[in-house]
Image: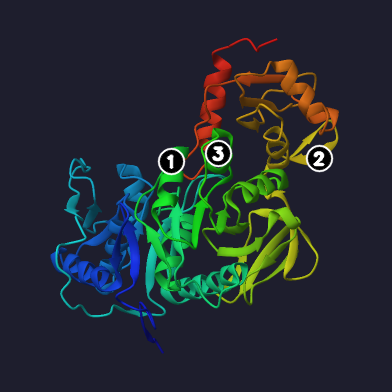
Amino acid sequence: MSRLQPLWQGRDLQAPVAWRHGVPISGAQFLADAQRLAGRLPPSARVVNLCGDRYAFSVALAAAWSRGDVCLLPPNAMPQTLAQVARPGESLVALVDDPDFVPASGLAVELVDAPWAEAAPADMPLLEEQADAVCLMTSGSTGVPQPHTKAWGPLRANIAAGVERLAQCLGQADLSGLTVVASVPPQHSYGLESSVLLPLLGGAAFDSGRPFYPADIADALARVPRPRALVTTPFHLKTLLQSGVPLPATDLVLSATAPLSPQLAAQAEAAFGGALIEIYGCTEAGQVATRRTSQGDQWRTFGELRVWREEGAEGERFLVQGGHVIEPTPLADVLELQDDRHFRLLGRANDLIHVAGKRSSLAFLNFQLNRVPGVQDGCFWMPDEVVEGVVRPVAFVVAPELSTAEVIAGLRAVLEPAFVPRKVVHVDELPREATGKLTARTLREFALSQLALSRPSRA
């Protein structure tokens, strides 16, 4: 039997739920804004949430939920992307916060210009536990992005487990008083869970912006009160720490989307003065585990989650179930299990590579490449062509101060000879998504175009 659950329980509605340009916005204002927006939406249209401002995004999310609707969260408004999340023949309304937004043909648009000047009393949204709440796109880092729908009950349980774990890290009973600043977009699974739902459902607050440049991130953190947290990625974090920008004390740093080196984690903790926690998960299962990287490489699952290995016709795979993961769900990675709640991460199941009889993973090679002093960003790619009977990896690097020989020397110190690249291509930047990820399709297109240029490597 379906059960209705309020969006919030036990939250002080006069306390900040968000900060915008240094000004607090109360929970009462948020509920009023969501209710007013819901009343402006076409009755039969499904909501596509394209807001970049985190407060406008959250109001749009709550407005859709208050109508009993699933909120569609595509990463962009391209027609082919919208076609993946929409049902045939249904009408969509795009909620945007950019008055200059140009919609695709036939797409209705509603501008979210909240907060409004006055906060009239509003009803608390009630959501059915079994009802679909959001439809996200998988990242595409292991193939073609696919739509994935999450029900409210499991989504809420996932956030509750995360709140409990992070409150323990802060030495608090809950997350009341915490303010979250994030450099990641809210339409991505990690951004949605850690920068929107974690504060919304966990009693914390969030900054409405999405700072990208180091100085902007530092300014955003300085504008909000302590305790405060930064939600970011390894790519953004490395850029921030290398910038030399003075960083305000930050009580908690969350990182996800790729493994973080213990050296960078320790550097971040020294710079911010707070704990750095990595989150492991995927769109299909949500947040699965955490680790404090400076203290070890072992991951611990959330709540009642359990992981195990299954042998099948196509080889081994690892699955997770329990808590917010109702059905056994495959993970895209190869794990080294300590028990059913603790594991080490070895790499993507589909990025294991074999060169000259040796086995490694692209994730491990990328990890080592980005640890080479002077490499600002870098990745390995496996081409299709066979040279001397072997397919050898190519390295693409953003390393303006290093020669090819210096990059290779750095890799020879940490890699088996078979995986040291014969070809290193210097580039100005890698085509990363806003989350810092490289999708499989984009990386392939980028690699082929760069190799076609036949740019000679720096000697």
| Tag of residue 440 | 3
Residue beneath label 2, please? 359
Separation of disc 3 and disc 2 at Cα?
20 Å
Residue type at mark 3: give it.
Ala
Residue at left offset 74%, top offset 66%: 342
How many other residues sit within 10 Å of disc 3, few (<14), some (14-19) or many (≥20)?
some
How many other residues sit within 10 Å of disc 2, few (<14), some (14-19) or many (≥20)?
few
Residue at left offset 74%, top offset 19%: 406
**144 relative to 341 in the view: left or right:** left
Horizontal and vertical percent position of residue 120 = 15, 74
**Residue 281, located in which quarter of the rendered image?**
bottom right
In the rendered image, the vertical position of residue 424 relative to residue 301, given as above or below: above
Horizontal and vertical percent position of residue 456 = 63, 9
In the rendered image, the vertical position of residue 87 relative to residue 242, given as above or below: below
How many other residues sit within 10 Å of disc 1, few (<14), some (14-19) or many (≥20)?
some
Are the residues at dot 3 and dot 2 in contact (C-beta closer than 8 Å)? no
Task: State whether residue 191 appears in this view.
Answer: yes
Residue beneath label 1, please? 212
Horizontal and vertical percent position of residue 164 = 56, 74
Q: Where the N terminus falls, by quadrant?
A: bottom left
Label 1 or label 3, whichever comes before in sequence order: 1
Q: Nearer the viewer, residue 443 or 101?
A: 101
Residue at left offset 55%, top offset 15%: 452
